[in-house]
Amino acid sequence: LNALIVACENMLCVHLISLIELIVSLSLHYGLQSVDISGTLFNRCFINWESPINASPLSENLENYLEVIWQLEQTHIVTRVRDIAASLKIKPASVTGALRSLAKQGLVNYQPYAHITLTDKGRSIAREITCRHSTIQHFLTDILQFDPILADKTACRMEHVIDKAFFTRISALSDFLAAGNDLPVEGESGFFI
């Protein structure tokens, strides 16, 4: 199964390059590049591109911690080191170092042996990361019909590196298709889907 997932991920990378070209063509064709994206609602997620997540980028690892803490805050009364470790499938000792780093940056409230909470700044960043993940995952599963497990793993990697223009275009295309619009087919404007 792991070999199949790796092979699919490699195929997905090749297809994503073609997909980027298609998205650029379609977005230009439909005028989607003219959308004001300074702070935009995509798929019911507000993305503030001037937010701290873009001003001071965190490592992928630290972004994952914020995302997990935010998800745990939604489902648990309190968030503990062991909950974070279980969610990330790592040892609790590894969590402690990351929490110290996040606390130093003012993104979490952390004291040893106490409950962990996100600061307002940390919560804002975590929501944006989660939004990026869900938007990308939706695009891969609902629009491109990828397997949900592969789409989730790919979205988890892409959410940390996706740039503003690409995210804007896949979001706009997703919204365009969700509104019941059809894509052009072969022979119409030179597109083939």
Image: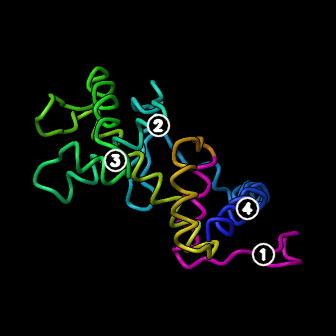
* C-alpha distance separating marks 4 and 1: 11 Å
Q: Nearer the viewer, mark 2 or mark 4?
A: 2
Q: How far apart are marks 3 and 2 (CA)?
A: 13 Å
Q: Which of marks 2 and 4 is nearer the N terminus?
A: 4
**Circle 3/circle 1 CB separation < 8 Å:** no
Helix, strand or loop at mark 1: loop
In the picture of the structure, the residue carrying the numbered disc 2 is 49
**Amino acid type at image mark 2:** Trp
Above or below, 191 relative to 125: below
Amino acid under disc 1:
Ile
Which residues lie in the magenta part? 166-193
Q: Identify the disc placed on residue 26.
A: 4
- In-image side of 171 versus 189 (left or right): left
Looking at the rendered structure, the number of numbered marks drawn on it comes to 4
Q: Real-space Cα distance between discs 4 and 3?
A: 28 Å
Q: Distance between the residues labelled 3 and 1?
A: 33 Å
Q: Name the residue under label 3.
A: 127
Quadrant of the image for the N terminus? Answer: bottom right
129 w.r.t. 102: above or below: below
* Residue at disc 2, secondary structure: loop
| Disc 4 and disc 1 in contact, CB within 8 angstroms | no
Circle 4 crowding by C-alpha within 10 Å: few under 14, some 14–19, many from 20: some
**Residue at the farthest top position:** 104
Location of residue 118 (image quadrant): top left
Q: Which of marks 3 and 2 is nearer the N terminus?
A: 2
Residue 181 sits inside the magenta stretch: yes
* Disc marking residue 193: 1
